[in-house]
Image (tube, coloured by chain):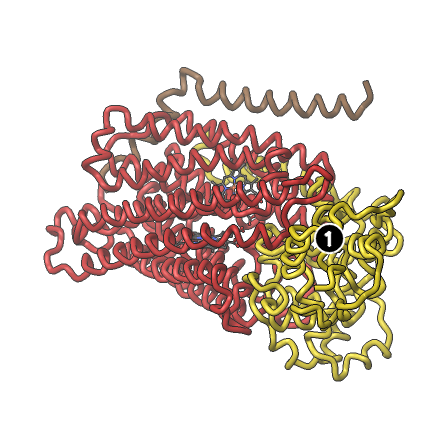
Chain colours: A brown, B red, C yellow
Amino acid sequence: MDWASILYLGVTFGLFAVFALIVVRTYNKKSKDRNESAKYRMLDDD
Amino acid sequence: MEKPSYNTDIVRSFVTWSLVWGLVAVLVGVIVSLQMVNPDLNFGPYLTFGRLRPIHTNAGIYGWGVGTIFATFLFMVQRLCKQPLWSDKLAKFQLWFFNATIIASAVTLLLGYTTSKEYHEMEWPIDVMVVILWVAFAINIIMTIIKRKDEQMYISLWYMMAALIGVAILYLVNAAAVPASLFKSYSAYAGTNDANVHWWFGHNAVAMALTAPPLAMFYYFLPKSTGVPIYSHRLSIIAFWSLIFMYLWTGAHHLLWTPVPDWIQTLAMAFSVMLIAPSWGSVINGYLSMNGQWHQMKENYLVKFLILGITFYGLQTLQGPMQSIRSFSAFIHYTDWVPAHIHMGTMGWVSMISFASIYFLAPRIYGREIYSIPLANLHFWLALIGQLIWSISLWVAGVLQAGMWNAMNDDGSLTYTFMETMVEMYPYWWARVIGGAIYFAGILIFVYNLYMTVRKKETIPSTTAEGRA
Amino acid sequence: MLEKKPVLFMILATLAILVGTAVTMVLPFVWVNTAADRIEGVTPYTPLQQEGRDIYIREGCNNCHTQTVRPLVAEVLRYGDYSKSGEFVYDRPFLWGSKRTGPDLARLGGKYPDAWHYKHMKSPRSMVPKTNMPDYPWLNDNPLDPDVIRNKMETLGFPYDDEQIADLTGKTEMDAMVAYLQKLGSDIPWRKAAETTIVGDLTNPFPGDAAAISAGQAIYASNCAACHGDNREGMIGPELTDMGMEDAELYQVLHNGIPDGGMPGFSNLGSTKVWQLVNFLNSGQ
Ligand code: HEM
Ligand code: HEM
């Protein structure tokens, strides 16, 4: 495999890793309350 | 907690002016649609189709679209941050500078000062004005957000900030030009490069002005109208990051089969198809938020506008990726199919959400309940029917036209001359005039309803009015 | 965390936006419009042509006309050779357009004689009765300003000489427009390359056939009358009553046109229609 393909694959997998990280971070059980709290707060009367 | 005193005057003013420019945009839309069926309606040199069409598009996107964005963002940011606006003076400046910019645009475009780049037609002095305007707006929003107490930011704020950054980058890069005089400049990029830069801008103007801001509004006004929160804040976060990441790769789907390098076209095609996921992330989030609330579709006219709007967004983001596939683009690119796509987006998605937002704002900025709900319902149906006539007739026209352009005889020659295909469009273009007139009638009723609301004697009792102001 | 910190959030959002931007918008500059793209024979616009181009932009012609031929069969047949990147290196801005309310113009240069364009721009419906293109008569009334045009050439860095600037005096915007239209797509010799030679004997498939003659008459009315007159009395093109051409010879002319004389070829009508025309023209009616 030449360097271009390796780089190409590397970037692709890197991007998937970032995406996976965002999903894991967002859906982490521990932070459920934190990540869902905003949708209730915005309903406060104003 | 003491309620901060929100600035509603500025929201009211922006609503008024966005309505004015919206009326202009749609009226000019009807005029250019008439010019397409009857060339005698061109009154040269100023009032020809070539000069009026950019006025229609720019008044639509920047006058009506961005005007509503200004109104709703300034409203939402104060409430979502529980902070008054960072600077009332700056907002006031923004209001007048906005109108000055739109008027200067309309006048210079009529005079023929144009760069020819779609949605970026205004010449360089107006680009400078746009930059000043956007910076004033962005600073006010961002500073208000920064001032707030540390709390998780609601998804609408995310989309708002992305739009602020996105529009700034896109507009600046695509504006690069060398002036030859006060009203004439030459693009800093040439030929194929210019095309590629321009459609990177063009498609992402759709993302950052016609997708992210209406999503910010949708995520705010839907729960506020139904009284129940959105289905999942976390889903909206995933969709957000994916959307703003993917959109920027897709510009070349406007340039399939052109001399732009193939690999850019292929990337654009792939990312456009992937965009279905984050787009539908929001659509599904919207639908699931209606769980147990579907009865509100009958009872609450705001919900009707919002749900129809997000539905058109869903259709738009299925149709768009389809158009981004090489074989499909080979067929429908350059035909009347594409304006039908555009207007499902602008008249269906962007405008429906904007109508709902303004109806929601009305009692809060005028201190009076809406004058007539039946009229609002009538407006809904006229907008829906007008838009459907517009789009459906032009989809049919586009397919017919594409078929005729490609039809070949047994001996390998073309079946139709160009004019033979063009005259077949006239009935469909007439149908569009009718659809457009119906839509325009709907907007007139909308404006009348708001006008009568302002004139109403009885105000909302002060306790609640304050709560809502 | 970042959901609470707007500044950090905006930095991350900017990065997300810049990845696709860097790859699909910035990176292409490495290849596009470089030596690899150059095509010999593609020249910058002359002062007159450049002014014509600027008028094309001012009038917003690009709102109805595109300027790229895609490499698709029907499109190449209809408009001519497909567009190459190197043909656009002097185009600031690009004018590829996005909607074909009217036909593509990328290969327009050399298709019609100048006289056709002068009449067509002044009143399109006099040449193409059912078109919806607006009239542009005022272009005839507006004189060119040589100083303004010289300044534009300087800004663009295009070569020009004083004679070219002096020649602009007395010319109108219409002259500039026509000069521009005639330059479009003609930097490469595609017309010569596309010309077909007919091999073998040509025999008229419908000699004297009344149906063919009346079909030919209808084709004449919609494709030829604008230049040769409703009754073949001649206008922009010569009169066509007594040509004294053999059927086969006439077929060749209609099929390929007369590039030097400004007559377009009609091969894309297909051989049947061209033969019908031949029968009409040679019918003595
Ligand atoms: C996943 C989302 C979308 C994709 C992949 C997409 C794709 C496309 C494509 C391929 C075209 C060019 C068609 C052609 O010329 O052949 C186009 C045009 C356009 N689309 Fe979309 N679309 C999407 C969503 C939207 C949305 C939400 C709007 C909102 C209004 C919109 C507005 C427009 C406009 C204004 C144009 C016209 C640009 C022009 O040619 O002047 N699109 N879209
Ligand atoms: C009654 C309503 C409307 C009518 C009758 C109308 C009519 C038209 C017509 C005739 C065109 C030219 C199509 C062509 O060249 O083939 C056009 C283009 C366009 N209109 Fe509208 N319009 C309406 C509403 C709107 C609104 C509300 C917006 C934006 C918020 C909008 C945005 C656009 C855009 C972006 C284009 C450019 C299409 C392209 O690039 O191909 N229109 N419209």
Residue type pointed to by label 1: Gly
As rendered, which of B292 and B139 lies closer to the eye?
B292
Residue B461 visible within the image: yes
Q: Secondary structure at mark 1?
A: loop
- In the image, farthest residue toward the bottom: C170
Residue B165 visible within the image: no
B6 lies left or right of C241: left
Cβ(mark 1) to ligand 2 < 8 Å? Answer: no
**Which residue is painted at 52% across and 69% down in the image?**
B110
Residue assigned mark 1: C208
Q: Please state, as top left, top right, bottom left or bottom right, where the C terminus of chain C lies in the image.
A: bottom right
As rendered, which of B437 and B176 lies closer to the eye?
B437
Question: Quick one: label 1, few (<14), some, or many (20+) residues within 10 Å?
Answer: few
**Which residue is painted at 23% across and 48% down in the image?**
B378
- Give the answer, above or below, for where B338 lies relative to C221: above
The percent coordinates of residue B239 (x first, y second) are 47, 29
- Give the answer, above or below, for where C7 lies relative to B446: above
The percent coordinates of residue B85 (x first, y second) are 35, 52
B305 lies left or right of C78: left
- Say which chain tag 1 marks: C
User: Which corner quadrant of the image does residue C136 belong to?
Assistant: bottom right
The percent coordinates of residue B197 (x first, y second) are 66, 48
As rendered, which of B53 and C147 lies closer to the eye?
B53
As rendered, which of B10 and B381 lies closer to the eye?
B381
User: Which corner quadrant of the image does residue B145 belong to?
Assistant: top left
The percent coordinates of residue C189 (x first, y second) are 86, 53
Count the marks: 1
**Which residue is painted at 58% across and 58% down in the image?**
C63
